[in-house]
Image: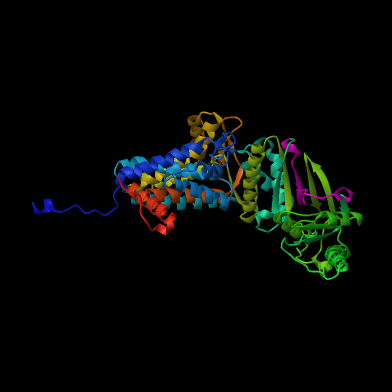
Amino acid sequence: MASMMQPQIILLKEGTDTSQGKAQLLSNINAVTAVGDVVRTTLGPRGMDKLIHDDKGSVTISNDGATIMKLLDIVHPAAKILVDIAKSQDSEVGDGTTTVVLLAAEFLKEAKPFVEDGVHSQNLIRSYRTASTLATEKVKELAVSIEGKSVEEKKGLLAKCAATTLSSKLIGGEKEFFATMVVDAVMAIGDDDRLNLIGIKKVPGGNMRDSFLVDGVAFKKTFSYAGFEQQPKKFLNPKILLLNIELELKSEKENAEIRLSDPSQYQSIVDAEWNIIYDKLDKCVESGAKVVLSRLAIGDLATQYFADRNIFCAGRVAEGDLNRVAAAAGGTVQTSVNNIIPEVLGTCEIFEEKQVGGERFNIFSGCPSGRTATIVLRGGADQFIEEAERSLHDAIMIVRRAVKNSTVVPGGGAIDMEISKYLRQHSRTIAGKSQLFINSYAKALEVIPRQLCDNAGFDATDVLNKLRQKHAMQSGEGASYGVDINTGGIADSFANFVWEPAVVKINAINAATEAACLILSVDETVKNPKSESAQGDAAAGAMGRGRGGGRGRGMRRR
């Protein structure tokens, strides 16, 4: 009786929502599966695009998993983990963002029946981690190195990797054209890891094939003053001076006051101002530079002065563009015009101003340092060019990864089928429940070829049966067979040059497994909503403080 009379212990604030146990875990799995279903249809060369319209009214059309995940604005706490793994895959390797989300969702989908049957989630986690380790080892074993080839051969192989990435994008129709461009751009920056050395400039109009690569720097013509028309628009081997100072007459501060005892002194003050600016301009001319670029404004006086001396100038150049000119031309940005020595001047083979569509571009090509490149993108609609830029970013990342880690694996679902077969065989050697768990992990990997077929409108069951039969051959000759998107059958992905860097697959499997294990390990969610009374008190307090620092009478209570 005494125990019945004991008061209830209140641990959490009133209104706190706690959900725990099996139901909570299943709810999280369902949320993750729902997110996976959103991006599922974007996978592969025949993947569909998503049109996302946000609250600010901007419209994005994208096929890129990471972009879609960022724009979806997911609020479910467990599903947010998928957004994080998509972002990490994007920043780490650039491609495979849809793959990683799809794999994580599928691993959890396969785990769901076991959870419903009362299997402890730690048993699942242990088996999944084991399977992940085995899978990554198998990928490394199956990977083929592209080291030791000549430069031309290597370029060709890298272009194949870039073409595989681009085939699933909006610009997939011109993948060979862009793949070659991407490889040339990555080769131009050499061993430098800074992505900002490859500039991508967008010019609406024309078609995709009008896009071109500048082996150097190109940027849109900046705002210019009168006198610009008289300046030369083309130089061969010019010296380039890069500045971070204003070259214009500075107006006095509004409250500046000068007292004169003699009216003739007024002229000397005006002359002093002009002498300062002329002194700066003379020093620029004496340096021998034929092209003067500045991050700050170059006024109308300076523009006319340079035009009279056959010198080209551009003010208000974006900092990124100025730094890329410095890296390519071998110059140094100066913060003063005093003591300009030849070593701080850059140079290039050809500088010219060209019309591209409706814009004029300043183009520096044939730079001696050569550690930069610019891709000028053309296309009909702004959204199309934006998506083309995102696609090229993925391809650039992939080529950089392939240069660094020069091993590739067959794409088109071939590597997934091979790992799936390997894990199924391995699971049969294990006694106990984990045989079932590793088998379900192997089944989940088949989602990639299955989804490739579904998105292309093929019979997924038929194609998967053919693939299983090919991969089950003892000789191992079917190991590189994947889905053939063109015919609806199966084909040797290696022979068809459907390649992707091994690091993409390894990263995707590891990240997806980690995310699945993380969600499986959560057994309770606690939400602490701010109770209405707390919000009301805060609002009333703020109101009181707003009037005379919170003193005086408050509002009369009804």
Q: Residue at x 89, y 49 (%)?
A: 230
Out of 285 and 234, give the one closest to the viewer: 285
Instruction: Between residue 272 and residue 70, name the one nearer to us.
Output: 272
The residue that appears at 48% across and 33% down in the rendered structure is: 465
How is this picture coloured? rainbow
Extreme residue in the front direction: 261
Q: Quadrant of residue 28?
A: top left
**Residue 124, x across and y down, in percent:** 36, 48
Q: Is residue 7 above or below residue 483?
A: below
Quadrant position of the C terminus in the picture: top left
Query: Within the magenta stretch, is there residue 212?
Result: yes
Q: Picture coordinates of residue 498 (x, y %)? A: 62, 41
Residue 108, placed above or below residue 327: above
- Do we see residue 171 in this rendering? no
Q: State whether residue 165 appears in this view.
A: yes
Side (left or right) of 383 relative to 525: right
Residue at 74%, 37% in the rendered image: 209
Q: Which residues are magenta?
A: 207-232
> Which percent across, then down, holds residue 511?
48, 50
Viewer-side residue, 111 vs 253: 253
* Among the 4 quarters of the image, the one containing residue 68: top right
Percent of width and height locating residue 332: 76, 64
Residue 60 in which image quadrant: top right
Q: Residue furthest left?
A: 1
- Relative side of 268 to 19, left or right: right
Q: Is residue 489 left or right of residue 24?
A: right
State the residue at coordinates (63%, 40%). Answer: 387
Count every numbered label the image shows and give the total: 0
Asked if residue 270 is positioned above or below residue 209 in the image, the reply reads below
Does 372 lie within the magenta span? no
Q: Nearer the viewer, residue 329 or 54?
A: 54
